Image (tube, rainbow, N blue to C red):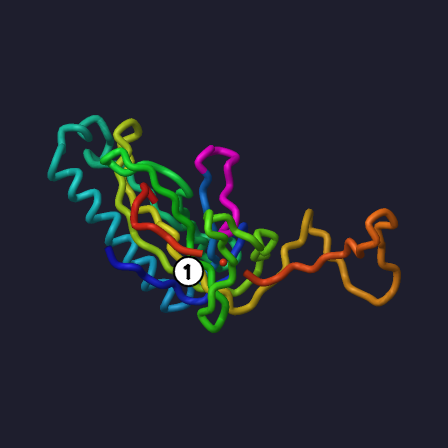
Amino acid sequence: MSILKTPRGKVQWAKVVVPDTKFDANGVYSVDLLLKADDPATQEMCETLDKQVQEAVAKQMDERPERFKSLPAGQPLTANPYSEEDNGLIKFKFKLKARGKTKAGEEYTQRPIVVDAKGQSILRIAEDGRVMNNSFSIGNGSTCVVHYQMIPYFVASTKQCGVSLRLKAIQVFQLEKYKAGGMDFEESDEFTYEDENSGFNTATKETSTQVAGDENGDF
């Protein structure tokens, strides 16, 4: 399965270092990418995805057309992995399961590759697979390129057909620091808190970081 690459864009809600377990105990890595709607490269990407969705629909119609007789168009409902925003941008959603099982029942773990502008791995991975510098984060507005795979899917319960974007890697060209709760703290040489009990300065700075992926998984 080929791996594709997006144009450069601004990312939102990047969870590429520590997977999100809020809705899935196995964890999900994810990132949203915003691209300009009037950019030819963006339009080409949308056309490619639309074509893949239609091919997925054609496959379902060829295999079991009787499943869709009750639907108005007599064919599967469709869903695209992108949406048009009100500000002239298009948002693309990428995901990757952190853990899962293959069809053969074998368990696997995977994570996206995260590299800097020179293609160097950012995260430091221990022998047991833990990310040593997991405080690294990619803040909203960072300029990145996403590497991904297109994964056709069909949901029998909803009769919905589409293409999901499997996150394989992300390259960071311009990093914006994560701002907790939208607060933007500045640095100065004035007051610095020190823990009197430990004798160590507790002020910390984020460091750069990254990982590797697996071909298995639903997305």
Crowding at label 1, few (<14), some or many (≥20) Cα neighbours within 10 Å? many
Residue corresponding to mark 1:
146
Whether the magenta-drawn stretch holds residue 165 is answered as no
- Residue 97 location in percent, x, y? 40, 42
From the top left corner, tell me how far across and down residue 49 is, in percent: 30, 54
Q: Residue at x 46, y 39 (%)?
A: 27
Residue at position x 24%, y 36% in the image? 103
Q: Residue 125 appears at what percent x and percent y?
A: 49, 55
Q: From which residue to which does the magenta span run?
A: 15-26
Q: Is residue 77 left or right of residue 92?
A: left
Q: Nearer the viewer, residue 37 or 56?
A: 56
* Residue type, mark 1 in image: Val
Q: Is residue 86 toward the left or the right of residue 190 in the image?
A: left
Which image quarter holds the C terminus? top left
Q: Position of residue 41 (x, y in %)?
A: 36, 67
Element at badge 1? Answer: strand
